[in-house]
Amino acid sequence: MRRFIARNAPGYVFLLPWFIGFFLLALGPILASLYLSFTRYDMVADPRWVGLDNFEYMFTRDRRFWKALEVTFTFVALSVPARLAMALGVAMLLDKGLRTIGLYRAIFYLPSLLGASIAIAILWRQLFTADGVVNQVLAVVGIQGPGWITDPETSLYTLVALAMWQFGSPMLIFLAGLRGIPRDLYEAAEIDGTPRWRRFTRITLPLLAPVIFFNLVLQTIEAFKTFSSAFIISNGTGAPADSLLFYTVYLFNEAFKFFRMGYASALAWVLLVIIAVFTAIAFFTSKYWVHYENDRD
Amino acid sequence: MKMNRRTVLGGIGAAAAASALPFLPAMAADRSIRHFWWGNPERDKRTFAVIDVFQKNHPEIEVSGETIGWGDYWTKMATQTAGRNMADLVQMDYRFLFEYVRRGALKSLDDHIGKGLDLSNFDKGPLSGGMVDGKLYALNIGSNSQVIPYNTRIFEEAGIDADVINWTRDDFAGVCEKITSHSGGAIKGSDDLSLFIENCEAWIRQNGRNFYDEEGNVQATAEDVAGFWQFWTDLREAGVVRGKDKTLILDAPMAESGLITGESAMVLYWSNQLVGLQSLTKDKVGAAMIPHKPGGAFGQFIKPSMFMALTRDAKDVDGAVAYMNDWINEPETTAILGLERGIPANANVRAALAPNFSEVERESVDYFNAIQDKVGALPLPAPKGAGEVRDAYMRIGSDVVLGNMTSQDAAAIFIEDAQSIVDRAR
């Protein structure tokens, strides 16, 4: 017991701020929202118990709920692979033992810090409006661009592009993973005359699989939770024609615009379940494609 | 004296208590009120000036002002309501008044009338707009009506000489066509006003129905809405209104309207907003009515543009009522407010303002006088869920603007959705 404490105490001390925050600030609201998801609550009158009504309405009658799912799933399916590919690509470029690597890492990480901010979402909006910078540049080469964010055909892709640009944190993790691949494997492959592409598919990818898996899970969760950029770019409404009705934007509107706190809480719990299911799928399938170096089998 | 830890601490404590003593009487009398409103730069400037005046006359009461745009106002208000920390005085809108009263968030003003709140010169019509179940809950701080502000310079240059108070839907379409062709397409006749539910509502009323009936059900028909959307689809296809890229930016700020950017000659606003609009452009802004339906009923109405209401969470009620009273009676305050929030309901205030009207204020009053006998009755307050119906209207209307749906199909879906929204909100 004493050894256990001695060995783990520093870890728990470092975790303490998180635990304090979780128990004091997060746990209460989380439990309250579970209760509220079975009520009708308009924030002024007291919550009224309605049983499973919220969930029944959601699955059987709420067209916008399904639309929000469609938008969000499309976004996840497009943005997660795009961001991971971007992150891996840049990480491999940076994994060349440059002396100024620290500087480049910082520069490439910058968009991820900025990307979550409101300012960037507003900037993005400016870039992609009908007479924004993007179309002005296209006009120079004689292309009449659409109103990227006001056209439901293209609006979601501007957000995928924004998500792709925020590749910083998976990139750093990839970079660390790449550093962990023994150099001698590459040297041996090079001596054997293995082409570059095969070195990538046969050495880099398999050995990086645990890291890819880790990034995939994390980024999928992130993508499901995308909110601020979609909220800003669609003026908080999911417009045009609900093409940017991200699940979280819909949830926010139900809660803070239409004052249906009970229904919004139900939506939040459904999102939690969806994310849990996807994470579980990733974990269960991982044994077929993720191999850890110290695996026995 | 021997110093130790305890005496030092005690000494510091005593010193602190002693130094605080002279302030105690002041702290006991510390009174503060919070005023929360939705605004625009012009309105915020005037309101903070009013707060300064009140502060000068009532140094014992501290007033703090909070302002935010319309879009976020109701979100913040709902959050504060739920958190039981509403501002003492809030700006209220006709469509939300009943909802907030029914939820018990506002205090009745009845007990203060004649005692702190002087309504002796207040018009009866505007006063009744703030009553719920026979009790006064909200004080009218201005009346307004719908208006189509237009660019007089562009009208003149295109040689347009229309009677913009009595004009018809066809006249309107003709003017749009003329402005567009005169400018070679560079300036469109109007912004695309098909996504403004207020505009559609006027159209429905011209057809002889209200949007909602007395029970709060949707009275408008799919044919009404389809006709309206088709009218605008025709204009859009003729290329005489501003492009869909701009139309689909919903609830865009004033400065982005075609009237201000110079891309079009007409927009749609509430008449008190003429003052704010004029401050954003050098061209003189004129005021037109929503075009009429020949032989139809009147679509527009005069409504309370804004209210001030006392909330359940108000602590210094007397201070808040004194502040409120100044808004409708105190000459220096009412002079600063002018017509920016709408036409004041106090006859004395109107008379005092008249000699010093700016050009746009004169224009607003002339417009207000001109439409008096060309408006219908004030519709009943919208039912719960009306805000969401407005969102659904813009969302489904967007599909018409984009050409994804015909006016008929979209209108049928919208009317069905609108009814189910109000049903669900009950």
Image (cartoon, rainbow, N blue to C red):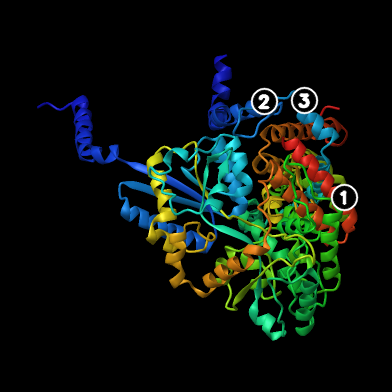
Residue B28 picture location, percent across and down: 28, 37
Query: Are labels 2 and 1 assigned to the same chain?
Result: no
Label 2: which secondary element: strand
Residue at 73% x, 25% y: name it: A50
For badge 3, the amino acid type reads: Leu
Q: Please identify, in this view, whether the residue under mark 3 or under mark 2 is nearer the observer.
A: 2
Residue behind mark 1? B412
Residue A54 picture location, percent across and down: 76, 30
Q: Is residue A16 left or right of residue B291?
A: left
Q: Callout 2 environment at 10 Å: few (<14), some (14 to 19), or many (20+)?
A: few
Examine the image and state in which quarter residue A119 appears: bottom right
For badge 1, the amino acid type reads: Ala
Examine the image and state in which quarter residue A217 appears: top right
Q: Give the camera-side residue of B230 and A61.
A: B230
Q: Is residue A207 left or right of residue B28?
A: right
Residue B209 picture location, percent across and down: 78, 52
Q: Is residue B334 above or below residue B416?
A: below
Q: Is residue A296 above or below residue A124?
A: above
Query: Are labels 3 and 2 assigned to the same chain?
Result: yes
Would residue A282 be seen by someone viewing this image from the given angle?
no
Quadrant position of the N terminus of chain B in the picture: top left
Q: Which mark is residue A48?
A: 2
Host chain of mark 3: A
Quadrant position of the C terminus of chain B in the picture: top right
Residue at 34% x, 46% y: name it: B61
Q: Give the camera-side residue of B23 and A76.
A: B23
Residue behind mark 3? A52
Label 1: which secondary element: helix
Residue B197 picture location, percent across and down: 73, 56
Residue at 83% x, 55% y: name it: B224
Q: Please identify, in this view, whether the residue under mark 1 or under mark 3 is nearer the observer.
A: 1
Distance (Cα) linking label 2 and label 1: 33 Å
